[in-house]
Amino acid sequence: MLTQATIRNPQGRRAVPTEPTSLAASHQLGDSIDLMGAPMSFARNEEIYGEREPAEYLYKVISGTVRIYKILSDGRRQIQAFHLAGDVFGFELDDEHAFSAEAICDSRILVGKRSAVMALAARDNGVARQLLALTTRELHRVQGHVMLLVKTAQERVVSFLLEKAGRSDGEAVELPMSRQDIADYLGLTIETVSRTLTSLESASAIALPSSRRIVLRNQAALSRLAS
Amino acid sequence: MLTQATIRNPQGRRAVPTEPTSLAASHQLGDSIDLMGAPMSFARNEEIYGEREPAEYLYKVISGTVRIYKILSDGRRQIQAFHLAGDVFGFELDDEHAFSAEAICDSRILVGKRSAVMALAARDNGVARQLLALTTRELHRVQGHVMLLVKTAQERVVSFLLEKAGRSDGEAVELPMSRQDIADYLGLTIETVSRTLTSLESASAIALPSSRRIVLRNQAALSRLAS
DNA sequence: CGGCGCCTTGAACCAAGTCAAGCTCTGTGG
DNA sequence: CCACAGAGCTTGACTTGGTTCAAGGCGCCG
C-alpha cells in the first residue's frame, strides 16, 4: 500500500516521505500536535532515523512501538525510550538526531516536516505551548528513567512492568519488545531480566503465560517491590 | 541585606519572597528568560523548595550552585542535576515539585512567579519558545545523565569531570559539591568516587591539590576513559 | 522434522558495595 | 599558638549483586 515507506536514501539509512508533506496542526485537539504529514509503514527492526542524521522530520506513532537508542563506544546499546501509539518523537536540540529510532514491530508512523511545525509554533502560540507540554512530559519521563537506573535489578524490572501496565488496558501486559530490548532499557543484561522475571513468577507476583505476555497477579506486592 | 531570604513558611520548609514579585521577561536577550523577580540569598544546605510542595516559583541561579534531588524510599538520595550560575530551574509538569532543591553553597537566586511567566508565555510567543528551548536543553542533559548511569564507575567519574571542566574556565575544576553529592549524582558510593579519583591521580590523568580542586592533566586520556 | 531466534538456567567471576578504621583539613576556644 | 572537635575524605578488607560464559530448552515457521 504505502510503498514509499521502505524507500531509503542513497546511504540506505533513512526512510523519507516521497512528496513534500502538507502539514497543519490543529491545536484545538488540546492534547497533542496532529502532524498532518504522511503516514508511513515501517517493518519490524526497520530504522526510522539514525544518530547524527539531520533532524528533518517529527514523528507520531499511529500504531506499533518504536525504540529510541544510542550505541555506546564499547558496542553496548542503551535504549532511551519506547514510544507507543499517540507518542510524538524526533525533537532535537540542534539540527541532528542525538539518537537512532527503529520500529520494534511493524508500525505506522505519521511523519511531518519539523521546520513546518516550528514555523507554525512561531506564529501560533497554542502550538508552541503544546510543544512545550510534550517536551516537559518527556523530560519528566526521562527523569523517571534516571531514578530507575540507580535501583536494584528487581526494582528496575518491577518498575518497568508497572509502567507498561499503566499504559495497557486489562490485567495482562503485552510486550512488543524482546528481553534484549528490556535489558538495554533497564541497563541490565538479558540474563538478569530473565532470572528476575522467573523469580517474580515463583513468588506468584506475576504469571508468564508466554514470554511476551505478563500477567500482574499481585499489583500491591509489585508496587512494594518497585521500592 | 536580604533578610527575607531566610523566612520560612509554617512548616519551616519553603523560603518565599516577602512581596509579590513584579515580573517581566525580556525575550530580546535571546538566550534565557530573565525573571525580573526578587533576588534571594540561600545559605549552604538551605532548602529552596521541597518535593510535593506547590510549584509557585521559577528560579534562576545568579551565583552559587544548587542540587535538585529526590530521596528514595530506602533513604538513598539521587541527585538529578547541579545548577550553576545562569541556569533556570523549577519547571514542573503539574503544579507540584517533583524534586527538592537545596543550595550547595551560599547562593543568590532570582525567584519569579511561575504563573506570571506562564501567562506571559501565553501572550508572547518569544517567551514560549524560550521556555521550549530551555526545556529541550534540560531534556538533552537528562538524556546524557541516563547514558552516564549505565557506564562503569571510572567512566562515570571521568565523564562528570569532563562535563564540569566544560563549564569552567582554566584547566582546574573547582567543585562546590562534596564527594557525597558527586556519588549521589553518579549513582555510586562515596568510597567508589574517592577510590576512582585516587586511581586517576596515580595514573597522572588528574591532580588533586585539594579535595575540592581537580586539575585535568591529560584531557585526551580522560576523554578516552570516558568511553 | 529440522533449523533458528529467543529465552532460561547454571556456575564461576568480578566490579562495586559494605563495614570499619584512620587521616586531613578547618574552625573554635583556651 | 596550640588543643580539640567535627565534618569530610581516603584507604583497607571483605561481601555480594549482577555479569559473563556456557549449555540447553522452547516455540515457530518452512
Image (tube, coloured by chain):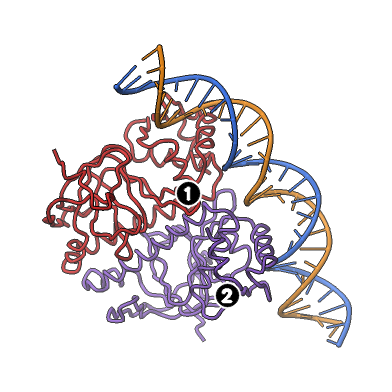
Chain colours: A red, B purple, C orange, D blue
Residue A89 is marked as none
Kindly state the secondary structure of the residue where label 2 is placed.
Answer: strand
Q: Nearer the viewer, residue A197 or A66?
A: A66
Give left or right: position of A149 versus A8.
right
Residue A52 position within the rendered picture, expressed as x and y whole percent measured from the top left: 34, 59
Residue B68 position within the rendered picture, expressed as x and y whole percent measured from the top left: 49, 64
Quadrant location of residue B105?
bottom right
Q: Chain of mark 2?
A: B
Amino acid at pointer 1 = Gly
Q: Is residue A192 above or below residue B186?
A: above
Q: Which residue is painted at 32% across and 66% down in the image?
A: A94
Quadrant location of residue B174?
bottom right
Q: Which residue is painted at 52% across and 31% down in the image?
A: A200
Residue A81 position within the rendered picture, expressed as x and y whole percent measured from the top left: 38, 48
Amino acid at pointer 2 = Val
Q: Are marks 2 and 1 on the same chain?
A: no
Q: Is residue B59 above or below residue C22?
A: below
Residue A75 is marked as 1
Residue B173 is marked as 2
Which is in the foreground here, disc 2 or disc 1? 1
How far, Cα to Cα, is label 2 from label 1?
A: 30 Å
Q: Nearer the viewer, residue A36 or A99?
A: A99
Are dots 2 and 1 in contact, CB under 8 Å? Answer: no
**Could you classify mark 1 by the number of other residues whose Cα lies within 10 Å: few (under 14), some (14-19), or many (20 or more)?**
few
Q: Chain of mark 1?
A: A
**Could you classify mark 2 by the number of other residues whose Cα lies within 10 Å: few (under 14), some (14-19), or many (20 or more)?**
many
Q: Is residue A150 above or below residue C28?
A: above
Kindly state the secondary structure of the residue where label 1 is placed.
Answer: loop
Residue A141 position within the rendered picture, expressed as x and y whole percent measured from the top left: 39, 52
Q: Nearer the viewer, residue A140 or C6?
A: C6
Q: Nearer the viewer, residue A96 or B177?
A: A96
